[in-house]
Image (cartoon, rainbow, N blue to C red):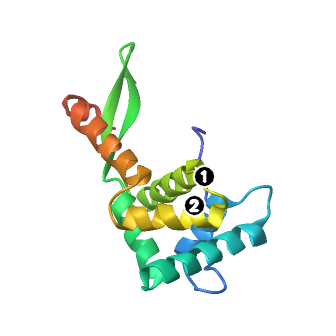
Amino acid sequence: MSRRNTANKRILYPDPIYNSKIISMLTVRILKHGKKGLAQKMIYKSLDLIKNKTQQDPLEILEKAIRNTTPLVEVKARRIGGSTYQVPMEVRAYRGTNLALRWITKFAIQRAGNNMATKLANEIIDASNESGNAIRKREETHRMAEANKAFAHYRY
């Protein structure tokens, strides 16, 4: 990380079909080798699958899944006097959303299945129902922060 100046936040444009910034953030997470069109096709196909399976608005289910997987606290390594402590820190809203999207895509990729659209749809549905690997990851993060609560006074 640079010590001189912070990176500028890029302008985020909403996606063309749903006009949602969350979907464009998800597109960036799935993107491989600069093939944005392919990533968007996968996401739109998975949103169609969600609509068929749940008979509800897929955008609402995606937002609920992200809300459910967003962590409130995380641990950061902080070096004090020669030893490293895991210090619990509160997560800002933007970082929390990014972490949630990262975990959902990571565990969707790891799922067993035939194509990415189906795996992503199933992971999003599981996350909206408060089950699945992304939720387990959030719970694990919260447990780590709870276990290291004693080092909370080392916050910067």
Q: Is residue 9 left or right of residue 139?
A: right
Element under label 2?
helix
Q: Which residue occupies the foreground of this view, 35 or 77? A: 35
- For the question of whether residue 98 can be seen, the reply is yes
Q: Which residue occupies the foreground of this view, 79 or 96? A: 96
Q: Amino acid at mark 1?
A: Ile
Residue under circle 1?
Answer: 109
Point out residue 98 in the picture as x, y percentages from the top left corner. Answer: 50, 58
Residue under circle 2?
Answer: 119
Point out residue 153 in the picture as x, y percentages from the top left corner. Answer: 22, 33
Q: Quadrant of the N terminus?
A: top right
Q: Quadrant of the C terminus?
A: top left
Q: Residue at x 61, y 59 (%)?
A: 8
Point out residue 112 in the picture as x, y percentages from the top left corner. Answer: 58, 51
Q: Is residue 18 above or below residue 4?
A: below
Q: Is residue 120 above or below residue 156?
A: below
Mark 2 closeness class: few <14, some 14–19, many ≥20 residues within 10 Å: many
Query: Disc 2 versus disc 1: distance between alpha carbons?
Result: 7 Å
Q: Which residue occupies the foreground of this view, 99 or 44? A: 44
Q: Is residue 56 left or right of residue 41?
A: left
Q: Is residue 28 above or below residue 152?
A: below
Element under label 1?
helix
Q: Residue at x 28, y 31 (%)?
A: 154
Say if mark 2 contacts mark 1, CB within 8 Å.
Answer: yes
- For the question of whether residue 153 can be seen, the reply is no
